[in-house]
Image (spheres, grey):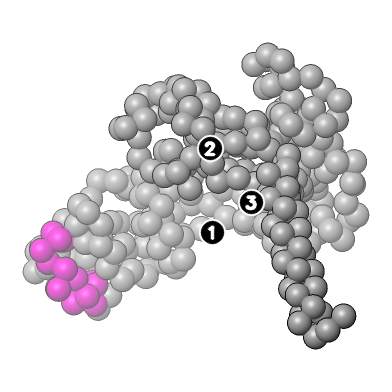
Amino acid sequence: MGRPGARRSLLLCGAGAIVGLIIAGFGLFTADGTRTSIVPAEDVALVNQVPILMSDYAAQLRALYDVSLSQATMRQKRQVLDDMIREELYVQRGVELGMQADTIEVRQALVGAVEAQAAADATMAVPDESALHAYYEKNRARYADEGQMALDDYVQPVSAAGRAAAAAADLRLSGTAPAVLARHGLRRSAIMTDGEEFIFAARLHLGERLFAVASRMKDGEVSEPVPLPDGIHILVMRHHIAPPPRPFAVVRDRVLQDFVTDQAKTLTAGNERFLRKRADISLQKGYE
């Protein structure tokens, strides 16, 4: 065969190969179980090609937040959709394990069964003493007795923010004499009682932000100004008894229970990550 004929043969072979690849690619991307970005209008998502109906999604938004689809915030939409995808993944996992999922009650039982499996795995894996001791040391505050604190909370108007640092410095130098308070426009708030309060009560009265400051203070200390919506707060610690930790031997049973509970949560989270990673999840446009 001459050179032109050989060239035609090579071209025909190349064209045939390209056509073959196109056909194979079409078959691959239209096969069962392949991810698709096309979600039917009546569905909000597909989980391994199983639909999550838009009507069920809207009903769940109404049940949880008492809002319609148009009224729901993006955070609410994402939370509900994430929960519904999680439920479907767990139901499908339960079916893989040989269970049936033909009613709402059975679906709920399947989710509980898959979650319970992780808890059972955590319970079966009994930790040794070194692991429990390490967990106790990492979470000592959880096993402490109740401490106490007595403090005063002084407040300036928000408009006095520029003078708050000077007020705190004066309190450190001169104390809480009436003249000092008047000079800086400070008023004592009523959120704390005059006497000592248990730590749990102080947390409730102060709120998380002020309590985080107070928990680090020692007797006689004056805090830096803490800006809050109702004013600039300056704390003066009169007496602080930090919660003393209870010995490991006393709280060992509780440490074991907490260890197993945390392990179960870790296993459950890992199981959910695995199910999501292997799943084919497609979302309706606008719900990504």
**Position in image of residue 26 (x %, y %):** 68, 50
Query: Are the residues at dot 3 and dot 1 in contact (C-beta closer than 8 Å)?
Result: no
Q: Name the residue tied to disc 1.
A: 242
Q: Name the residue tied to disc 2.
A: 39
Of callouts 2 and 3, the N-terminal one:
2
Q: Amino acid at mark 2?
A: Val
**Position in image of residue 218 (x %, y %):** 44, 68
What residue span does the magenta drawing correspond to? 156-171
Front residue of 112/265: it is: 112
Quadrant of res 88 = top right
Mark 2 falls on what kind of element?
Answer: loop
Q: Main secondary structure of the magenta part?
A: helix
Front residue of 27/131: it is: 27
Disc assigned to residue 142? 3
Which residue is drawn at the image coordinates 68% and 14% (left, top)? Answer: 103
Quick check: 163 above or below 244? below
Q: Amino acid at mark 1?
A: Ala
Picture quarter with the N terminus: bottom right
**Position in image of residue 187 (x %, y %):** 16, 56
Residue 124 shown left or right of residue 146 in the figure: right
Quick check: 147 above or below 58? below
Quick check: 183 above or below 241? below
Number of the front mark, 3 or 1? 3
Q: Is 160 contained in the magenta span?
A: yes
